[in-house]
Amino acid sequence: MLLSAGLQLAFLLLGSFASAERELLSTTDGPGQTSINWLAALGTGSAPIDLADPRLAANTAVTDAEQIHLTFVNSTAVFVSWSTGTAQNTAAPVSLDQIGTTNTTVGAANYTVKFGTSPTALAASQPGYISTYKQVYTGFTNSTTGAYNTNPALNYTSQSIHHVQLSSLQPGTKYYYQVPGSYGASPTLNFTMPPAVGNYPMTLGVIADVGQTSNSSQTWARMAAQNVQVATLVGDWTYADDYLTNGTTVYYGFPNNTASPALFPSPIGSYQPRWDSAMRLAQQLIGYVPMIPNSGNHELEPLLHGNYFTTQKFGLDSGLQFNSYLSRFPIPYFQSGGQSLFYSVNVGPVHMVRCTSK
Ligand SMILES: *[C@@H]1O[C@H](CO)[C@@H](O)[C@H](O)[C@H]1NC(C)=O
Ligand SMILES: *[C@@H]1O[C@H](CO)[C@@H](O)[C@H](O)[C@H]1NC(C)=O
Ligand SMILES: *[C@@H]1O[C@H](CO)[C@@H](O)[C@H](O)[C@H]1NC(C)=O
Ligand SMILES: *[C@@H]1O[C@H](CO)[C@@H](O)[C@H](O)[C@H]1NC(C)=O
Ligand SMILES: *[C@@H]1O[C@H](CO)[C@@H](O)[C@H](O)[C@H]1NC(C)=O
Ligand SMILES: *[C@@H]1O[C@H](CO)[C@@H](O)[C@H](O)[C@H]1NC(C)=O
Ligand SMILES: *[C@@H]1O[C@H](CO)[C@@H](O)[C@H](O)[C@H]1NC(C)=O
Ligand SMILES: *[C@@H]1O[C@H](CO)[C@@H](O)[C@H](O)[C@H]1NC(C)=O
Ligand SMILES: *[C@@H]1O[C@H](CO)[C@@H](O)[C@H](O)[C@H]1NC(C)=O
């Protein structure tokens, strides 16, 4: 995927098949209708939004339940995910046996999603599980000199990231839902299930390299305004790996487009609070539209050692290199017998194969 932050691509594919009677087209018949071409103005890049900006900052006045998002499973199931509590980005050493992602099963009495087809009757509810992860850095190998630098970087401990699967849903039906927090519930959100497998038409939103700039915010908003029925992101969600662990950027994007070669991608870590902020920004679309996620090279955030050019500490799909991404998106690989970075789903008329674009 692209290395430059803020370079992004967004377009909508409108189902070009107006009625079910028409013979189905395939990709060999040429492209279907594209309703919105990508907006060149959004591809020029813009500077990351400041973390204190209301679009990126946590709003904990009413509830700590935030970063609400939907992951498509199949035409009758979605995952609802959200975060609660407080993340830590501190110098405190972290026990190495705690790295990676840990699942906790929680009781149905709390952390349970309420949902239903009427906003005033959210009777049904299902329990789920919580993922927490730690992004741990012990030091790094200098890619120029090969020397190991033991200067430790800050260590991140995530919020509780909740995942609840809603199943037995009806394709094409609107649902309302609400997620609980530690001291208050979220507002009632809504989503409409994509059409049943094989059904036309369907509007698919495709996005890539989105980041968290003012242009990124526009991209999410534009796609939400187009009423896409399902969305996919090809890869590169946050560019948190363009930062040192203390939040100092190592990539000077728009308007400079310069980077320090010794520092880019960040050799000593990533700034995980930029994941939290990016997920807040994304809620304007993926709180309402099921997402089919995919990973790119910017989701490759190795633990322990930051320099993935010289230190392939773990296998590609160990999960440890895609720790943040996989903790935040419950990939529905179990539907296709795939694995977290390589899977497929059936959605409306589409059989979508997702392979990491790393
Ligand atoms: C994208 O960002 C650039 C630079 O900040 C800005 O000039 C442009 O207006 C933005 N485009 C949109 C559609 O927000
Ligand atoms: C959809 O997913 C749900 C939940 O995993 C599962 O129970 C159901 O069998 C799936 N439906 C199809 C058609 O695969
Ligand atoms: C982060 O945790 C690792 C593993 O315990 C430790 O080696 C490192 O020193 C910690 N970082 C800081 C800044 O203390
Ligand atoms: C967490 O639970 C989910 C759902 O059961 C599972 O797919 C995933 O592999 C688990 N992750 C870990 C690290 O145990
Ligand atoms: C790596 O070593 C070179 C040469 O000493 C130095 O200029 C550079 O700043 C080092 N990189 C980091 C990230 O410390
Ligand atoms: C949720 O359950 C956990 C574990 O039983 C408990 O510690 C916590 O207080 C509960 N939270 C709420 C808001 O009820
Ligand atoms: C569903 O959510 C959207 C996006 O926030 C909102 O504009 C719309 O009013 C909601 N629909 C209903 C019926 O509540
Ligand atoms: C973060 O660390 C870098 C490298 O040590 C340093 O140059 C920068 O000033 C630090 N930034 C903050 C906000 O502490
Ligand atoms: C441009 O790059 C320099 C470092 O080369 C940096 O100090 C400055 O903050 C950058 N400006 C912007 C707007 O990113």
Image: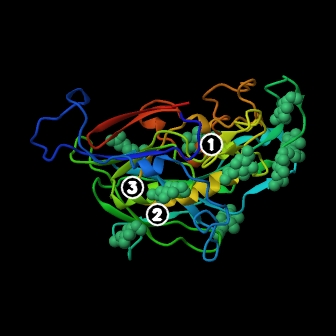
Label tally: 3
Q: Observer-nearest residue: 31 or 252?
A: 252
At mark 3, the secondary structure is helix
Q: Kindly indicate the quadrant of the structure image that contains residue 96.
A: top right
Marks 1,2: beta carbons within 8 A: no
Q: Position of residue 281 (x, y in %)?
A: 54, 59
Q: Position of residue 149 (x, y in %)?
A: 88, 32
The residue at the far left in this view is: 21
The residue beneath circle 2 is: 125
Q: Position of residue 309 (x, y in %)?
A: 71, 25
- The residue carrying pointer 1 sits among few (fewer than 14), some (14 to 19) or many (20 or more) residues within 10 Å by Cα, namely few
Q: Earlier in the sequence, mark 1 or mark 2?
A: 2
Q: CA distance from mark 1 to mark 3?
A: 26 Å
- The residue carrying pointer 3 sits among few (fewer than 14), some (14 to 19) or many (20 or more) residues within 10 Å by Cα, namely many
- The residue carrying pointer 2 sits among few (fewer than 14), some (14 to 19) or many (20 or more) residues within 10 Å by Cα, namely some
The residue beneath circle 1 is: 257
The quadrant of the rendering that contains the C terminus is: top right
The residue beneath circle 3 is: 223
